[in-house]
Amino acid sequence: MLTKNNTIYDVVIIGGLGHVGLPLGIAFAEKGLKVCLYDIDKNNGEMVKKGQMPFIEYGAQEILEKVLKAEKLFISFDTKDISKSKYVIVTIGTPVDEHLTPRTRAFLEFFESIREYLTSSQIIIVRSTVYPNTCEQLLRMLSNGKSWHIAYCPERITQGYAIKELRELPQVIAGLSDHAINSAAALFSLIAPKIIKTSMGEAELVKLFSNAWRYIQFSMANQFYMISHKFGVDYERVRWAMKEGYERAANLPSAGFAAGPCLLKDTMQLAAFDVNNFLLGHAAMMVNEGLPNFIVENLKKRYDLSEKKVGILGMAFKADIDDTRDSLSYKLGKILRFNGAQVYYSDEFAKNPTFISKEKLIENSDVIIVAIPHSNYKGIVIPESKEVVDLWGIVKGGKRELPQGYIASEYTSVNFFNSAFSQTVRINKPLKNKKFLR
Ligand SMILES: NC(=O)c1ccc[n+]([C@@H]2O[C@H](COP(=O)([O-])OP(=O)(O)OC[C@H]3O[C@@H](n4cnc5c(N)ncnc54)[C@H](O)[C@@H]3O)[C@@H](O)[C@H]2O)c1
């Protein structure tokens, strides 16, 4: 137990009902700490109070129920509660603005608004992804002759899998005082297998580079997909052949929408930090954001879209979660509607009264686009009369522009007798370890 006499909680998490704050709070509470989730979202707050996860986080529901029952987790909408904890972790959103530049001032103004509830004896841990030097600016803003303890410990989980990853991932920790670094390390070592201490600049770049790296990798896959497609070759089959027994290509991702609230945003934070010289970052944005246009332009070559009904399967920003923030499926829908198509949306997890079931969508549509590879789309059979665009190669049947591989039934190379006499045969066997990386 970390609480001292003058505090009620061990940890208060500001933005504690969000996708980063809530699983983190649950993880600390599971370790026996008394955690307060402070937030302004009353809807999510009421759900969490009743023991209901407001969004998909695999493995979180059971622990949430357990820690509420054990009176380790509390929900607050009262700013005063910020002053009642030794540790203050900040996990509010840090979006970019309409010029794709960071909203650093808004982040600092937020601290200004809660300043009266902060004291220099607390350990303030910034967990939101921030523009480099933000923590130093925060220290300057707060200091007023006192020594404050500010740490930066960037969140690196992939959404939906936070509970598992918080147990497995090393935590990168930097701080602006030794006390901040050591205290943050002591806290995170309760839930993490390893602590990596770095300088503040290193930690800031670790986070931005990690997301930019993933975003650029996805853009490579998407560019390869477009090149293959124009050449009349299915990229998924090229990728499979590249990776088969060839470790150097093992982490080449499948093509697909690279979306969500973090990857593009953080790539653009890095571009802004490098005074718009981050050419690869901007190129990645053009490729990734251009993929919906590429799909529509290809359809337009063959169909008058104003006469077509087009169904989009998958509205979340990635597979098997319910979060639609910054999903490229909406951009795709918008471009299709610009071109006169009637568009239907469906999702397996995200709820929206305008969405229809996948069965109804397949029945109603002339063209079906698999935008997100939710697990239960795998292997569904589309009638031969309907056009299918399936970047992931996970559905069967349908009319396709290219003879696209249904990957669960794959080709493999078999050596007969010796290497001098080998041939490729088709066998009906699922491909092992096929993972969708988003
Ligand atoms: N979502 C992810 O997988 C992920 C992964 C790594 C890092 N991050 C970073 O973590 C940060 C948070 O992302 P998120 O996805 O959890 O966002 P989110 O929108 O899900 O959560 C933010 C929470 O902050 C709350 N909030 C906003 N303003 C507030 C205020 N003034 N006072 C109190 N609460 C307030 C919101 O109500 C919300 O519950 C961002 O910087 C993001 O880039 C996110």
Image (spheres, rainbow, N blue to C red):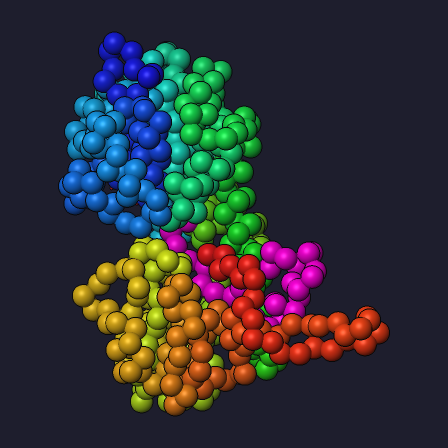
Q: Which residues are magenta?
A: 235-262
Q: Vertical placement of 374 versus 118: above or below?
A: below
Q: Is residue 258 magenta?
A: yes
Residue drawn 47% across and 18% down? 182
* Horizontal relation, residue 400 to residue 277: left or right: left
Q: Position of residue 169 (x, y in %)?
A: 49, 37
State the residue lying farthest toward the front: 417
Q: Is residue 425 magenta?
A: no
Q: Vertical placement of 87 versus 282: above or below?
A: above
Q: Vertical placement of 346 versus 198: above or below?
A: below
Residue 416 vs residue 225, the one in the foreground: 416
Q: Position of residue 179 (x, y in %)?
A: 45, 15
Residue drawn 56% across and 75% down? 428
Q: Quadrant of residue 342?
A: bottom left
Residue drawn 40% across and 42% down? 162
Residue 30 vs residue 40, the one in the foreground: 30
